[in-house]
Amino acid sequence: MGKTVMEQYKEKLRTADEAVKVVKSGDWVEYGEFMMQAKDLDAALAKRKDELKDVKVRVVTCTFMPEIVKADPTREHFLFNDWHFSGVTRGLQGKDLCNYIPLTYHESGKFIEDFTHIDVAFMPVGPMDEHGFFNIGTSNSISAYVRDKAIIKIAEVNTSAPKCLGGLKEAIHISEFDYIVESQTNPPLLSLGELPVTDVDRKIASLVLEQMEDGSCIQLGIGAMPNTVGSMIAQSDLKDLGAHTEMLVDAYVDMYEAGRITNKRKQIDKGKMVYTFAMGSKRLYDFMNNNPICASYPVGYTNDPCVIGQNDKVVAINNALEVDLYGQVASESSGFKHISGTGGQFDFILGSYRSKGGKGFICISSTTTLKDGTLVSRIRPTLSPGTIVTVPRSCVYYVCTEYGMTILKSKSTWERAEALINIAHPDFRDDLVKEAQKQNLWTKTCKIN
C-alpha cells in the first residue's frame, strides 16, 4: 500500500537551511514569479555564500531585494537574472548586479523545455489540500514548465497565498516535490498601491473607450493608463465584456463588480476571466481566492496569439516608452537602460489582430520630462541609440496619444510618419517634419492637420 499524502508530507518536510543543501556550485536555480517568490529559501541560500561559486539564479519580475544579492555584491558566488525586470531589478542592473533574459512570453514552454537548464526550482505554493495538491497561487505563468524541467523541486509553503483555481496546471501534487519547506514568516503577497493617474492618462483612456463595443474581450497591460481604462469601463454602459489577459489587475474586479464583465459572449473559456498571473492589491487577491470565475492558465495558453484570436473583439491595451516615425515600438528599454521586458505586449498585439473585430492599442503620452526638467517627445524620428524594439513596425496596429489615434496597418513609410506626427505634441511637430524630410519620409502630399 502506498504512503498517504500526509506521510509523504512529513517525510519530505525540511527546514529551509536543510533544503538548500541540495544546491551545488555551478547550479541553475529558479526562484518563482511575480508575487509568488521564495523568500525563506533565498535567505537560507544566502547563508551558504562562502560554500558556493557560480550559482546562477533566475526569477520572474523580482518583487523583493534578494538576500543572495545583499550577501554577494561582487557576484563572485551568485549570478542573479530576471526574465522580466521590475523596479528592484532595474536598480540592481544599474549596479551591475542583475541581468535580463530576453523572452517572447508565449514561447516559454518550448523555450524552457528545449533550451533552459534548471537544477533546482524553489517553488512558492499555498498549503497542501486533502488530496495532496499545492496551489501555485497568483503566478501560473512559466511555473508548470519550470516544474517539468527542474531536476530537484522544493516547495516553499506560504499560508498567505490565495487559492487560485484553473484553468490548467494551477496545482502541483506532493509526489512531484522532493522537499517541502514551511515558511516561517508566511509573508502577505505584496500589495501594489494605486498608481497616480494624470489628465493625459484619462484622455488617452477616453479615446480607447470610444473604440470599444459590447462583447469586447479585454486585455490590460501594466501601468496607470490601462488601469484607468478599466476604471472608466466600470463606469460605462458597456455590456457583456470578457476577460482574457496576461495580467489580472484590480481594474478587472471593478469591471466585474460593476456588471460590465460577464464573459458570456466569449468564444472560448466562456464564463471565465482567464489570466496567467496577477499583481494588485489585497482586494484583488481576496477576490481571486477560491473564486471559480477566475481561471489560471500557463502563459503558453493565455498569450498564444492563436488562442487569443479565437475570441472575437479582443481589445489589447498596452503602454510604451517610445514610438519612432517608422512605427517601431519600444516598451522595455530606454537607450541602454533596461526597464521592463517584452512581456505580453507583443503577444497580444498579434493576437488582437487575429481576433474578429479585434483592436490592439499602443498607448503613449506624447511627451515625457527628463530628470533635468527637459520636455521631450515620445514620438521620435528614430529610437534612441541602444533602445530595444518590442513590437516591430510590421505588427503595430493602433497607436494612441492624448492628441488622437492612428492605425498603422497598410500604411507606407510616409503615411506612417505623417500619421504619427499628427498625434505628437504640437510643440514638436515641426521638428519631426524636418527629421522626416531628412529621412525621405515626408512627401509633397503630407501635411500637419
Image: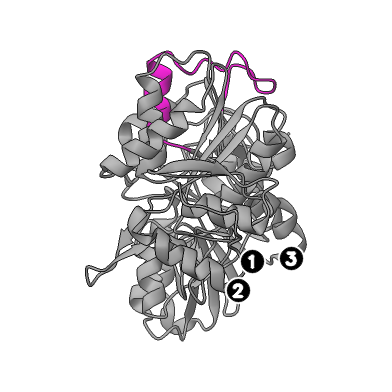
Where does label 1 land, which residue? 119
Horizontal relation, residue 35 to residue 198: left or right: right
Residue 265 among those drawn in magenta: yes
Residue type, mark 2 in image: Asp
Mark 3 element type: helix
Numbered disc 1: secondary structure: loop
Q: Amino acid at mark 1?
A: Asp
Q: Name the residue carrying label 3.
A: 115
Residue 421 percent coordinates (x, y): 48, 55
Q: Judge from the rendering whether residue 88 lies leftward or rightward of residue 420; answer left or right.
A: left
The magenta stretch spans residue 271: yes
Q: Which residue is mark 2?
A: 27
**Chain part drawn in magenta:** 248-273
Q: Residue furthest front?
A: 444
- Mark pair 1, 2: CA separation: 6 Å
Residue at 54% over, 16% down = 214
- Quarter holding the N terminus? top right
Crowding at mark 2 (Cα within 10 Å: few <14, some 14-19, many 20+): some
Residue 132 placed where, x, y %?
59, 34
**Mark found first going from the N terminus, 1 or 2:** 2
* Residue 30 location (% of width, % of height): 55, 61
Q: Position of residue 26 (x, y in %)?
A: 60, 79
Residue visible at 58% across and 64% down?
Answer: 389
Q: Is residue 119 above or below residue 348?
A: below
Residue drawn at point x = 57 percent, y = 75 percent? 24
